[in-house]
Image (spheres, rainbow, N blue to C red):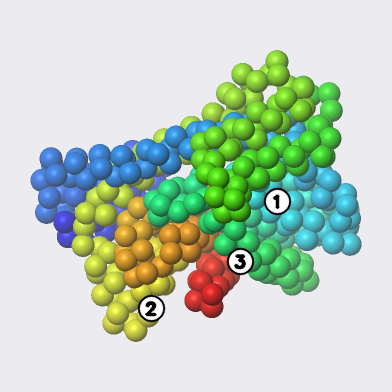
Amino acid sequence: MTALGALIGLFLSILLIIKKIHPVYSLMIGAVLGGLLGGVSLTGTMTSMVDGVKDVSPAVIRILSAGVLSGVLIGTGAAATISNAIIRKLGVRHVFFALAFATFLLCAVGVFIDVAVITVAPIALVLGKRLEIPVPVLLIAMVGGGKSGNIISPNPNTIIAAENFGADLSSVMFYGAVPALIGLITTVLLTKLLARKHTVRSTAPLFLQEQPEGQEQLPPLWISLLTPLVAIVLLALRPLFGLVVDPLVALPAGGLFGILCMGYGRKTGELLRLGLQKMTPVAILLIGTGAIAGVIKHSTLKDEILSLLGHLNLSDIIIAPVSGALMSAATASTTAGAMLASASFADIVLGIGVPAAWGALMVNAGATVLDHLPHGSFFHTTGGVCELSFKERLKLVPYETLIGTVLATASTLLYLLF
């Protein structure tokens, strides 16, 4: 299959997504046309697409199981407890660090980045009014912290990258710790600089939701933290003691432990349904990305990219973060970007001698570079929760790209150094 056909199919998918066609159908249509234009028969194209979907099926199962932990953290109010505690402990003197660290920690323990921003945003808006901080600056703090936490989280993007590289999830999370901290520090410094120069104002509604609707009180902090900690400890048994606990078991175990400790046994079904609702769109999206990834994987696109890197005298290693960045730009999604890049280029990255965990980390970090573009839901969700206009939200894209670039660069340099 020719590289040109695969590229045309990918660009068509992007165009359809921008035109508000559902991303899954957009990706599937792009895959079909990419295969046909690439010189492959309809039967051959279908085979490539099905092979691509088969490749992502193990990750789909693990992502659905991760919904147990996510549903518990969100549905019980544990996520809100963690964010509130961070803001209160660090106080207004360290407001940018407090907001960035709150979303950092929420993402690091398995909460989706958009959900993390939505959880912290009401507190941020109240602080912003009190301290006269422009709302766009507050959003940069939350998004940057979330991006940094996302590369060390048991979230779908990390799971899918680890799965496609055949890497241990806990190792990918561990290797990303230093780049994540660098990204967090960069976010805090950037927001402090922007706070002095940024003059954009927003008409955001100012309110503070202390607890989920219909819930009497938020759970204690120690239980809220213990819930994801159980999952993380189970994942850490493999690198520490050689005991393999698959994420398929570890993540639901943490969620169920939290249900028992917080006394939510009677609401188990409700919390599981909430978690499934959060993960189902991601799982469905992976079907579409798997289909077009199968087409890209069977094309000569990878060879063309390697040839280009050779002409530019750039190391083959850079294909890991660059592929993540390009695919995140195409899909405006960290998960889809990490999935497409890892499914399409894992063999090449592994073939040049990069260890699986490092390859997965670099692709995952690269997927944070351009996952916030306007044709994706993250752009509109985060802008909407802060009541920013399209133009105001668009002005933040370069700063988000900078933070993602720092994460990708730090991951790559750390691998080269060690």
Answer above or below: position of 362 versus 231: below
For disc 3, the neighbor class at 10 Å (few under 14, some 14 to 19, many from 20) is many
Q: Which residue is mark 1?
A: 105
Give the image quarter of residue 171. Answer: bottom right
Q: Residue at x 77, y 45 (%)?
A: 83
Q: Residue at x 61, y 53 (%)?
A: 240
- Give residue 342's position: percent from left, percent from top: 39, 55
Task: Determine contact: label 1, label 2, CB under 8 Å.
Answer: no
Query: Which quarter of the rendering shows the N terminus?
Result: bottom left
Q: Is residue 375 visible?
A: no
Residue type (three-letter) at the residue carrying disc 2:
Ser
Q: Which tag, 3 or 2, sits closer to the chain's start?
A: 3
> On the rendered structure, is 153 left or right of 259?
left
Q: Gap between marks 1 and 3, in whole Å? A: 15 Å
Which label is found at residue 315?
A: 2
Answer above or below: position of 154 versus 133: above
Q: Which residue is mark 3?
A: 179
Q: Which tag, 1 or 3, sits closer to the chain's start?
A: 1
For disc 2, the neighbor class at 10 Å (few under 14, some 14 to 19, many from 20) is few
Q: Relative to the observer, which residue lies in front, 328 or 54? A: 54
Residue type (three-letter) at the residue carrying disc 3:
Pro
Residue type (three-letter) at the residue carrying disc 1:
Leu
Determine the secondary structure under disc 3: helix
Residue at far top of view: 266
Q: Gap between marks 1 and 2, in whole Å? A: 33 Å
Query: Which quarter of the rendering shows the C terminus?
Result: bottom right
Task: Determine contact: label 3, label 2, CB under 8 Å.
Answer: no
> On the rendered structure, is 367 left or right of 240?
left
